[in-house]
Image (cartoon, rainbow, N blue to C red):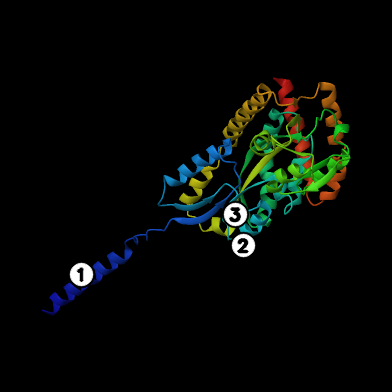
Amino acid sequence: MRTQLHHISSVIVSLVIALLALPATPAKSEPVTGRIAASAPKGSVWDRQWDRYKADFASRPDLFDLDYHIYGELGASEPLLGALKRGRVHFVGTSQSVISTQIPEVAVLSLPYLFESKEEADYVYDCCIRDLYQPLVAKENYVLLMFAEAGWSHFYADREIRVPKDVKGMSIRAAQSPAVVGFLQQLEADTVFLTMSDVVPSLQTGMINGGFGAITWHMGATREDAPHFALTGHVYETGLFLVNKRWWDGFTDEQRALMNEAFEGFDSQRLEVRQDQDSEIARLIAEGDPVYEPTPEERVLWIQAGRATHAAVLDEIGGEAQAIYDRIMTAKEAFKTERDAR
């Protein structure tokens, strides 16, 4: 009897040990919740791209349950950066001009005529830009997911602009970026700092005569009150998709993978934006708007005026600005070497 009890006890102990050795069944994780903020004009190419981003996340409700505010419902971009840092907003799509108020070195990307062509800009962004800025973004406790095409900046105004001297004395809307301010000072314009939401009322009251930005914004906001559009193409504008780092650090590997996949593809994203913006410029011309494309000789004047600001602006920005600029110049030379070798 004692032998039988001992045998039964041994079996029970063995079973308990075996059960304890089995891997624990993982608890089902809850989907990540978060607030997404951006300022995409309704019906624009960026709005359509956001529809695809949202569809990607909607396909995995087990991983994400996100609250979207992509039409500027949460206010101006500048205050949103503070909300992002504090975790009140978890994802912000913002412009390079706005983020440069917090990370000054981003203003290097807004230097006029930094890039000579879209091909050159693509080469430099693909090889270097994200790696150059990710460490600076990390210092602010953000994660940089992707740069996104915003388009080339052109002047819009209530009067014709052909050459740099035409801007002299005009009141021009500007973002608070040293690169933008330096360019307008070089042109001897009166600089007026306004958020995008204040631009149209200021045009209507005559507080400003114009500004500059991508054709998409012009079509949706400034076309009626500032119909003159000069194709200066002086700044290659990008947006930045930034994520609160603490929020990101709480993701599983699967959640990180899905977010990276949703917001990767700068090459295809920018192609779609360019095609859309080219068609909008063609539409302006077809509909009889006063659109002016500088001649090659006039373009040289614009480039000279823009690049004359680089040294002073870099000195004003300080920090890593000169090192970033030098790295961009090196990449531009590599692009030219590869292009000429083809």
Q: CA distance from mark 2 to mark 1?
A: 56 Å
User: From the viewer's perspective, is 266 left or right of 316?
Assistant: left
Residue type, numbered disc 1: Val
**Residue sitting at the far top:** 342
Which label is found at residue 36? none
Camera-near label (2 vs 1) is: 2
Q: Secondary structure at mark 2?
A: helix
User: Are the residues at dot 3 and dot 1 in contact (C-beta closer than 8 Å)?
Assistant: no
Q: Which numbered disc flags the more N-terminal residue, 3 or 2?
A: 3
Residue 322 seen by the camera: no
- Asked if 169 appears above or below 317 in the picture, the reply is above
Q: Which residue is mark 3?
A: 74
Q: What residue is shown at x 15% (from left), y 77% (from top)? A: 5
User: From the viewer's perspective, is 228 left or right of 305?
Assistant: left
Which label is found at residue 86? 2
| Mark 2 nearby-residue class (10 Å; few <14, some 14–19, many ≥20) | few
In this view, the residue in front, 338 or 21, is 338
Q: Which numbered disc flags the more N-terminal residue, 3 or 1?
A: 1
| Mark 1 nearby-residue class (10 Å; few <14, some 14–19, many ≥20) | few
In this view, the residue in front, 332 or 297, is 297
| Mark 3 nearby-residue class (10 Å; few <14, some 14–19, many ≥20) | some
**Which image quadrant: the C terminus?**
top right
- Asked if 136 appears above or below 161 in the picture, the reply is below
- Residue 119 in the image: state x and y as whole percent: 69, 28
Residue type, numbered disc 3: Leu
Q: What residue is shown at x 73% (from left), y 47% (from top)? A: 106
In this view, the residue in front, 86 or 128, is 86
Q: Which residue is mark 1?
A: 11
**Which image quadrant: the N terminus?**
bottom left
Residue 95 seen by the camera: yes
